[in-house]
Image (tube, helix red, strand yellow):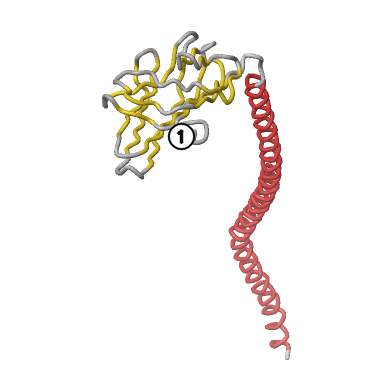
């Protein structure tokens, strides 16, 4: 009994020491493994913070982009409205200017016709439209068949010639002996009527003369009278230059 008690007294402290030694080693092992884990957790935390920052930044940029788009739409509407108003104002101003020019005292317009048939017309003969329908500005002379430009500008002229029977007549619009446009009337039988003509818009200088003349066909004829006004000459000043 005494021996057993002595063994117990000697062994128990050794057993307790062994437990303490083992616990210390395990604690050292745990402490050694906890450092990498702590570093990993800190890295994850930093990444989470970075992600949160990026998400907030993207959200802020998205809000700014929406704001810029809204401002761009508003600016586009404002520019469109200003451009529309600018265009309307310019067109209105130009229209007023053109209308003012057309309503000036210098307006010129005439229309005249041949009141009697013309026979034995030669090459280069002036076709005189002797009866006026209108002669605003007095620029057309029915005695000579000449129109004289009272001012430099753009003018519109038209003419028509009538023909009856198997005859042919060529007529041209002339400015200071220079041909502008031509017209022809050519009947085929004695009971056939034909009419030809042309239209031209011409820039004239002040004092230039415009008239109709026959060409290409000697000893020809044209038909027109007070009842059947088939041959005529007309002109109007469109605007000054």
Considering depth in this image, is 41 or 77 the residue closer to the camera? 77
**Quadrant assignment, res 185:** top left
Q: Name the residue furthest bottom.
A: 1
Considering depth in this image, is 86 or 73 the residue closer to the camera? 86
Residue at x 68%, y 43% (from the top left corner): 73
With respect to residue 27, does 208 lie above or below?
above
Mark 1, secondary structure of its residue: loop
With respect to residue 22, does 134 lie above or below?
above
Residue at x 49%, y 33% (from the top left corner): 229
With respect to residue 232, does 66 lie above or below?
below
Residue 180 is situated, as x and y percent measured from the top left of the image, at 37, 23
Residue at x 58%, y 18% (from the top left corner): 108
Q: How many marks?
A: 1
Residue named by callout 1: 230
Residue 158 is situated, as x and y percent measured from the top left of the image, at 46, 28
Considering depth in this image, is 195 or 91 the residue closer to the camera? 195
Q: Name the residue furthest top.
A: 207
**Quadrant assignment, res 127:** top left
With respect to residue 183, does 126 lie above or below?
above
**Quadrant assignment, res 14:** bottom right
Residue at x 29%, y 39% (from the top left corner): 166
Quadrant showing the N terminus = bottom right
Q: In the figure, is residue 155 to the left or right of 97?
A: left
Q: In the figure, is residue 44 to the left or right of 233?
A: right
Considering depth in this image, is 4 or 86 the residue closer to the camera? 86
Residue 224 is situated, as x and y percent measured from the top left of the image, at 45, 32
Residue 40 is situated, as x and y percent measured from the top left of the image, at 60, 58
Callout 1 environment at 10 Å: few (<14), some (14 to 19), or many (20+)? Answer: many
């Amino acid at each position: 009994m005494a021996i057993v008690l002595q063994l117990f007294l000697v062994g128990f402290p050794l057993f307790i020491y062994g437990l303490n030694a083992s616990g210390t080693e395990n604690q050292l092992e745990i402490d050694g493994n906890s450092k990498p884990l702590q570093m990993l957790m800190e890295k994850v935390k930093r990444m989470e913070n970075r992600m949160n920052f990026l998400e907030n930044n993207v959200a802020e940029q998205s809000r700014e982009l929406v704001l810029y788009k809204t401002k761009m739409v508003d600016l586009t509407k404002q520019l469109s409205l200003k451009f529309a108003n600018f265009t309307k104002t310019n067109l209105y101003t130009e229209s007023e200017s053109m209308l003012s020019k057309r309503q000036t005292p210098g307006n010129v317009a005439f229309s005249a016709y041949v009141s009697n048939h013309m026979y034995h017309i030669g090459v280069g003969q002036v076709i005189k439209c002797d009866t006026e329908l209108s002669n605003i500005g007095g620029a057309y002379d029915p005695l000579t068949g000449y129109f004289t430009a009272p001012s430099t500008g753009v003018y519109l002229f038209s003419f028509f010639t009538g023909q009856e029977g198997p005859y042919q007549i060529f007529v041209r619009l002339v400015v200071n002996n220079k041909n502008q446009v031509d017209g022809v009337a050519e009947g085929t039988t004695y009971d056939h009527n034909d009419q030809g003509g042309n239209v031209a818009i011409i820039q004239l200088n002040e004092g230039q003369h415009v008239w109709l003349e026959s060409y290409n066909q000697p000893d020809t004829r044209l038909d027109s009278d007070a009842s059947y006004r088939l041959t005529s000459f007309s002109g109007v000043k469109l605007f000054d230059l």
